[in-house]
Image: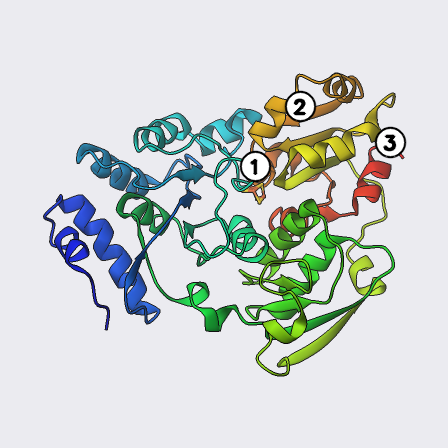
Amino acid sequence: MMVLDKDQELVLSGNNGTVLGSAMRTLVEYGKVFGAKRLVPIKSAHIAGTFGIIRFNSFYAILRQMLDEGLRVRVPTTVNPRPGREFSIQNRVAFFHQRKLERMLEQLGVIENYSCVCYEERNMPARGDIVAWSESSAVQYANSVLGARTNRNSLLIDVCSAVTGYTPEFGYLLDENRRGRLLVRLKIKKMDASALGYLLGMLAVDRVPVVEHYPFSRVELKNMGGAMAASGAVALFHVEGVTPEAPDCASVFDGKPEKEITISQEMIDEFRYRGPVDMVIFGCPQMTFDEIMALAPRFVGRTVTKPTIFFMVPDAYNRFRGTDLCRKVMQAGVRLETCCPVSALTSHQGMYKKKKIMTASGKTYYYLDGSLYGTVDDCCAACGVM
Ligand code: F3S
């Protein structure tokens, strides 16, 4: 049974407005399904519903009701990427309501970051903070790399949490569900974190994997987590001696792991496509500034032989575009974008349906129909800069 405090009861009763009461009821019912005993305050929210899809009428109607009642987000709230409405005529139709949706989100008081990598600069919870995020890659990073606590919430649940400031306490908010269950040993000579994440998502499914020590960078952790959360239902992983809740294996497992697996070089190499491609894309989760700065020098003084796009965090793009390196990358023929590659390329099927698109993102590989996977080196070779 869920027990609410006095303030929560008042909100639920409609005392502070009927729409806010409905948002609270939604969270209560959501929590009951998963056995939550109470609602807990959150430090921040992250909203995934940023695609102005033509038929999302109920979503827009609920946002409109919230605005008509004068609701605003009660905690710092970031939002996911734009869908790439300008990419094609098909996208203009598919995301017909983009401007209307953005206006409503902005009236609600969100931070206009428009990125799934909200945790780089705009929304950085500390270890132990309870937050209510949706967007599987961001949830994964918050839980695993930052040591914050969030469930993998859905569209609209995130909005209800943002306007009430609460989330039901269950799942990854509780210590017992954050313990390691699967020990992952590595026999890898050349790391490809994105492919490793993709494979781990399939093997772990919803168990918390603990990867034995490897000195992953933050960018690798981002890309590994994004892939893992796409191919599986994983919302938390640990890396021994790297992520905050796993200083060593003994402290993250309750006794022995349920299962132990070994990932070999051959297993992660299996995803690599080695034939010719028509187009190459980088980013997903969107590229951070550090990621762009690491990749961009490879393009200096070169000319891409295939259409090549960097999909970047908008803040990172704004920093990058003032640099000499940016000018050189554009001279090489690279196109720079700040939207979500999966939505941008999925919906204009007419143009890209038969194109062979290579990506170094395990998440894009999972979601973008017909895409082909390659390591970052493979992608550079495919677009002629290696
Ligand atoms: Fe982000 Fe879009 Fe990929 S939301 S994780 S860039 S699918």
**Residue drawn where x is 63% and y is 23% of the image:** 319
Q: Are marks 3 and 2 in contact (CB under 8 Å)?
A: no
Residue kind at label 2, given as amino acid type: Phe
Residue at disc 3, secondary structure = loop
Counting from the top left corner in percent of width and height, residue 50 is at 43, 37
- Mark 2 and mark 1: span between their CA atoms? 18 Å
Q: Is residue 372 left or right of residue 187?
A: left
Q: Nearer the viewer, residue 378 or 109?
A: 109
The residue where tag 1 is placed is 340
Tell me which corner region of the image, top left, top right, bottom left or bottom right, holds residue 377: top right
**Residue drawn where x is 11% and y is 49% of the image:** 14
Nearest to N terminus: mark 3 or mark 1: 1
Ligand 1 within 8 angstroms of badge 1 C-beta: yes
Q: Nearer the viewer, mark 2 or mark 1?
A: 2
In the picture, the disc for residue 320 is: 2
The residue where tag 3 is placed is 385
